[in-house]
Image: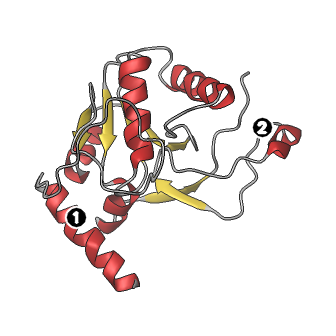
Amino acid sequence: MKYARLFKIFILSILNYYSVNLLAVEIPTGYRTDHYRAPTPSSVPNATTLNTRELQTLLAQESVTLIDVMAATYRPETAFFDGEWLLNEPHTTIKGAVWLPNVGYGTLDSLQNRYFQHYLTRLTNGNPQHPIVFYCILDCWMAWNAAKRAATELTYQRVYWYRDGMDGWEAAKLPTMEVQPLPIRFD
């Protein structure tokens, strides 16, 4: 089973590297609100889709904000720990990225929405032209949703979606790091 998943990641990474899309998935009018781990469209409205090679080029050319949107369980007692997330295991991401869990859900509650907008403003210094790359893992709608929300609702101008996500990055043996999610604080 493990080898089958690795083989799938390898094949999909190669196809994405060469911008080949064998499965045409329609772009929804809204956001994906369930079954987040499923084939995704090839693009996000008002955003640019990147493969691993293109992301490496972008990172080499300019300062980019990388945002990992992988989900994490939010527990109400987080409020008692100064907004720090209470995690059960470490999380690995692209070196230099920040982790904003749960901002890719199809529907954000008021706390998640405030969390997302607060950190986008902070990470971009309020500059809607600052390049932002959203990612998760391969076949993950959460990164697609977050990129669409930033590009259409929040009107950021240079939004990128790294469709291959951590699966593609790790398959290319590129640098990673363990990361903690940004706290749910608004100071």
Q: Nearer the viewer, residue 28 or 13?
A: 28
Q: In screen coordinates, is 78 left or right of 98?
A: right
Q: Nearer the viewer, residue 87 or 112?
A: 112
Instruction: Identify which residue is drawn at 85% across, 45% down.
Output: 77
Nearest to the eye among marks 2 and 1: give it. Answer: 1
Report the amino acid beneath label 2.
Gly
Q: Residues within 10 Å of mark 1 (few under 14, many from 20)?
A: many
Report the amino acid beneath label 1.
Leu
Residue matched to label 2: 83
Q: In the rendered image, which quarter contains the N terminus?
A: bottom left
Q: Residues within 10 Å of mark 2 (few under 14, many from 20)?
A: some
| Mark linked to residue 128 | none
User: How far is disc 2 from disc 1 in space, using C-alphas?
Assistant: 37 Å
Picture coordinates of residue 153, whole percent (x, y): 42, 18
Picture coordinates of residue 94, whole percent (x, y): 44, 52
Picture coordinates of residue 106, whole percent (x, y): 49, 37
Which of pointers 2 and 1 lies earlier in the amino acid sequence? 1
Q: In the rendered image, which quarter contains the C terminus?
A: top right
User: Compared with residue 89, is residue 127 higher up or lower down, i.e. above or below?
Assistant: above
| Mark linked to residue 12 | 1
Tell me the SS state at disc 2: loop
Instruction: Identify which residue is drawn at 27% across, 78% down.
Output: 7
Identify the image quadrant of residue 186.
top right
Instruction: Identify which residue is drawn at 40% across, 47% down.
Output: 141
User: Compared with residue 90, is residue 60 higher up or lower down, i.e. above or below?
Assistant: above
